[in-house]
Amino acid sequence: MKNKGLVLSIFIFCIANFVTAQENKPTFLDKTHQNSFSIELAAISYSYAHKFNSNVILGARVQGGFGLPITLLSTPVLYDFGYGDGSQEVNPKSHFEVFKLQLFYRHSISNNFYFDLGPFGSVSPFGESGWEKPLKVGVEVSAYYSIWKIHIGLRINGALCFDYDDANILRADDTYYVLDAIPFVIGFNF
């Protein structure tokens, strides 16, 4: 009789643990206030998003440091190197972004996978040649997979690059468009 009681107690204990283990705990994307820190190369960013309802999550991200996007495509610019050959076509690349600000809309695909999409602006004062421009304005999309409190992802952005003193940035000869990727971003959600 004691063995049946012991077996029944163990069975009930196991069932109770199984049922409570299956309860859905709130995920990062279920929170009203979503905070996260991310690292890419030698840059760190802080993001805050506010969940207004199940379909509307809006936020902002501030980044500082030395973020280095990889240039996938860029439109050529004409640049005179001063050798007497006249202007030559150059395909510029993006350089270290020292400061970046982005406003975004967050869309979750599942409890662990989500996108951030929105406009951004960045400052990149370390261009090594006369054709690299220090200001970028464009649209960036980020894709993240989160597990526990860690997220891993990538970012892709398209931007217009121009100089501080361009009177009309859309008509300047040295303004160009660029498509960049940041292939590895890792961070912490809280």
Image (spheres, grey):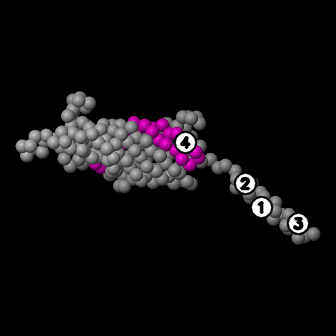
Judging by the rendered image, the residue that carries numbered circle 1 is 14
Percent x, y of residue 106: 50, 39
Residue toward you, 163 or 131: 131
* Circle 2: residue type: Thr
Q: Quadrant of the N terminus?
A: bottom right
Asked whether the residues under the numbered discs 3 and 4 touch, taking CB atoms below 8 Å apart as contact, a structural biologist would say no
State the SS at label 4: strand
Residue toward you, 172 or 120: 172
Judging by the rendered image, the residue that carries numbered circle 4 is 108
Q: How far apart are the two marked residues, 2 and 1, measured between alpha carbons?
A: 10 Å
* Circle 4: residue type: Ser
Q: How far apart are the two marked residues, 3 and 4, measured between alpha carbons?
A: 48 Å
For label 2, the crowd category at 10 Å Cα-Cα, with few meaning under 14, some 14 to 19 and many 20 or more, is few
Residue 125 in view (yes/no) = no
Asked where in the image residue 16 lies, by quadrant, the reply is: bottom right
Residue toward you, 53 or 138: 138
Write down the region rendered in magenta: 95-120
Going from N to C along the chain, the mark reached first, 1 or 4, is: 1
Q: Is residue 30 magenta?
A: no
Judging by the rendered image, the residue that carries numbered circle 2 is 20
Asked whether the residues under the numbered discs 3 and 1 touch, taking CB atoms below 8 Å apart as contact, a structural biologist would say no
Asked whether the residues under the numbered discs 2 and 1 touch, taking CB atoms below 8 Å apart as contact, a structural biologist would say no
Q: How far apart are the two marked residues, 1 and 4, measured between alpha carbons?
A: 34 Å
Percent x, y of residue 164: 23, 36
> Residue extending furthest right?
1
Going from N to C along the chain, the mark reached first, 3 or 1, is: 3
* Circle 1: residue type: Cys
* Circle 3: residue type: Gly
Going from N to C along the chain, the mark reached first, 3 or 4, is: 3
Q: Residue at x 52, y 37 (%)?
A: 57
State the SS at label 2: helix
